[in-house]
Image (cartoon, grey):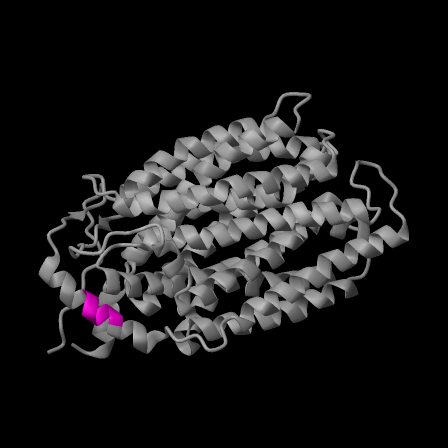
């Protein structure tokens, strides 16, 4: 076969990739609502102390982190007539819906305990969906460049879910509605979107359970062996930094853009929408860049440009939407590449591990990666809210902050994210698992799978089979 024919045979059909990406809609919607709007709502509108809100998010993240490892290991062990990761997608949707309902429609007088319990349920459902989605993607697109493409499409589709959440406060402000009503509207939107999106994925996407080679049994100490693999350790450290930087910004976003830059909540939401929507173009294009210069080099490009753009935010004139949109678009374009590239790189490591151990470990590897994201999320909200409470910043509605408190807010908003994002890019220096090495791994896996493959392809409901392995050119 010609090179172009081989590439075409390896490429997942666009219609399948688009349908599969639907799970990204509720996942991304939850991420924006939880990181940007919900903490402020509980602190400002429900009257829970700022430090207590930060502590609640931190506690839940710390409880939630070990659960991901168990979920990932269990997913990899699952083998049913419904498939492996498809079954977990079915299970995760109702759990997420329950958490969303109670978290976004709270009764009057709730406290920290209510917030913690509801966050635990919501994060459990979200973890099940996110882990099964990422691990399923790794098996759906087994080749190096097509993974960058698929994860780019997933992130791009996710932008639509995030943008929908951002549109809610913009529309409500135009209608003259209060900020307090935004959260319940967001909750109902996610509650309805989740079963629709997951049903589309289950209906349209095939799944093939990779064959397993007898031998290696996973032991508890193997966690350490996975984490300390040179390629995976770099990904984990990069992912931790690339989650902590933007997560830190998200926690302080509304405070910074309203109290420092002079925007209303609705205007700040429009600028955040520009940032998020930039990812619709940025995610696939950063994935495409990765096919030209490799994934780890694309990470270094994205982090460098992102940090430079972030510094320029202080130059935005008070309340100037037109000028403010320019750096927000550029920053969002680059930020979209962070998850696209690190998640696609994790799939490459999963192939390397399966070649060595003969067992599927995608779910477990993504669970470990998600752990770093959750650790970053816990610290980004818990630490930044604690810092603001200690430097004299007041978060309550109508509070008057001193110029010194506003200045401290600005420092907290900019310094931490720039440092962490640049550290994330630096983690990719010396990364070894590039396209050539992965091609060797895939060739060995394909040859071995042909000998051991007895597992049937779990077709989609529409009867579409999984992407075939291209025929040999010889």
The spot of residue 322 in percent (x, y) is 72, 60
Task: Give the residues drawn in magenta, as a range.
Answer: 441-445
- Residue lying at 20% horizontally and 71% vertically, measured from the top left: 443
Q: Quarter holding the C terminus?
A: bottom left
Question: Does 93 sit above or below residue 248?
Answer: above
Locate residue 426, reporting x and y percent: 55, 73
Residue at the image point whose x is 54% and y is 30% from the top:
118
Give the residue at x 78% y 41%. 395
Residue 290 position in % (x across, y down): 43, 72
Q: Is residue 427 magenta?
A: no
Q: Is residue 305 above or below residue 464?
A: below
In the rendered image, the vertical position of residue 463 relative to residue 357, given as above or below: above
Q: Please say whether residue 444 is one of the residues in the magenta stretch.
A: yes
Q: In which quarter of the view is residue 421 placed?
A: bottom right
For this orientation, the residue located farthest to the front is 221
Where the N terminus falls, by quadrant? bottom left
**Within the image, what quadrant is residue 226 found in?**
bottom left
Closest to the observer, 257 or 107: 107
Out of 4 and 422, give the one closest to the viewer: 422
Q: Position of residue 455 (x, y in %)?
A: 14, 50
| Residue sitting nearer the eye, 297 or 174 | 297
Number of numbered tags placed on the structure image: 0
Tell me if residue 157 comes above or below residue 296 in the rendering: above
* Residue 168 showing in the rendered view: no
> Seen in the image, is 247 located left or right of residue 101?
right
Q: Is residue 442 left or right of residue 65?
A: left
């Amino acid at each position: 076969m010609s090179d172009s024919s081989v590439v075409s045979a390896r490429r997942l059909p666009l219609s399948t990739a688009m349908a599969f990406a639907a799970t990204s809609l509720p996942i991304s919607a939850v991420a924006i609502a939880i990181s940007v709007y919900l903490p402020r709502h509980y602190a400002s509108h429900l009257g829970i102390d700022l430090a207590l809100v930060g502590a609640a998010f931190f506690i839940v993240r710390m409880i939630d982190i070990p659960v991901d490892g168990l979920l990932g290991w269990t997913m990899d062990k699952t083998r049913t007539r419904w498939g492996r990761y498809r079954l977990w997608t079915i299970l995760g949707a109702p759990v997420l819906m329950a958490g969303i309902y109670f978290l976004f429609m709270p009764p009057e007088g709730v406290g920290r305990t209510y917030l913690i319990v509801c966050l635990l349920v919501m994060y459990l459902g979200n973890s099940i969906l996110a882990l099964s989605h990422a691990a399923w993607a790794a098996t759906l697109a087994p080749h190096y460049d097509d993974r960058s493409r698929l994860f780019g499409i997933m992130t791009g589709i996710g932008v639509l879910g995030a943008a929908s959440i951002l549109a809610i406060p913009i529309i409500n402000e135009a209608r003259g509605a209060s900020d307090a009503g935004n959260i319940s509207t967001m909750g109902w939107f996610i509650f309805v979107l989740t079963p629709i999106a997951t049903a589309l994925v289950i209906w349209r996407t095939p799944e093939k359970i990779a064959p397993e080679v007898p031998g290696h049994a996973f032991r508890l100490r193997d966690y350490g062996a996975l984490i300390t693999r040179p390629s995976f350790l770099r990904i984990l450290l990069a992912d931790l930094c690339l989650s902590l930087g933007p997560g830190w910004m998200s926690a302080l976003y509304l405070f910074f853009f309203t109290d420092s830059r002079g925007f209303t909540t609705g205007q700040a939401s429009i600028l955040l929408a520009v940032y998020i929507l930039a990812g619709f173009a940025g995610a696939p294009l950063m994935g495409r860049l990765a096919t030209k210069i490799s994934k780890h080099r694309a990470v270094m490009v994205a982090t460098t440009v992102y940090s430079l753009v972030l510094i320029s935010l202080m130059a935005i004139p008070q309340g100037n939407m037109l000028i403010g949109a320019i750096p927000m678009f550029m920053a969002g374009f680059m930020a979209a590449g962070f998850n696209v590239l690190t998640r696609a790189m994790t799939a490459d490591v999963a192939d390397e591990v399966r070649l060595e151990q003969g067992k599927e470990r995608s779910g477990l590897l993504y669970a470990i990666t998600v752990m770093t994201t959750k650790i970053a999320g816990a610290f980004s909200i818990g630490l930044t809210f604690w810092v603001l409470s200690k430097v004299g910043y007041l978060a309550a509605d109508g509070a008057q902050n001193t110029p010194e408190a506003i200045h401290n807010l600005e420092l907290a908003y900019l310094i931490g994210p720039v440092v962490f994002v640049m550290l994330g890019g630096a983690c990719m220096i010396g990364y070894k698992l590039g396209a050539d090495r992965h091609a060797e791994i895939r060739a060995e896996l394909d040859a071995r799978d042909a000998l051991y493959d007895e597992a049937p392809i779990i077709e989609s409901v529409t009867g579409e089979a999984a992407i075939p392995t291209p025929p040999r050119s010889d």
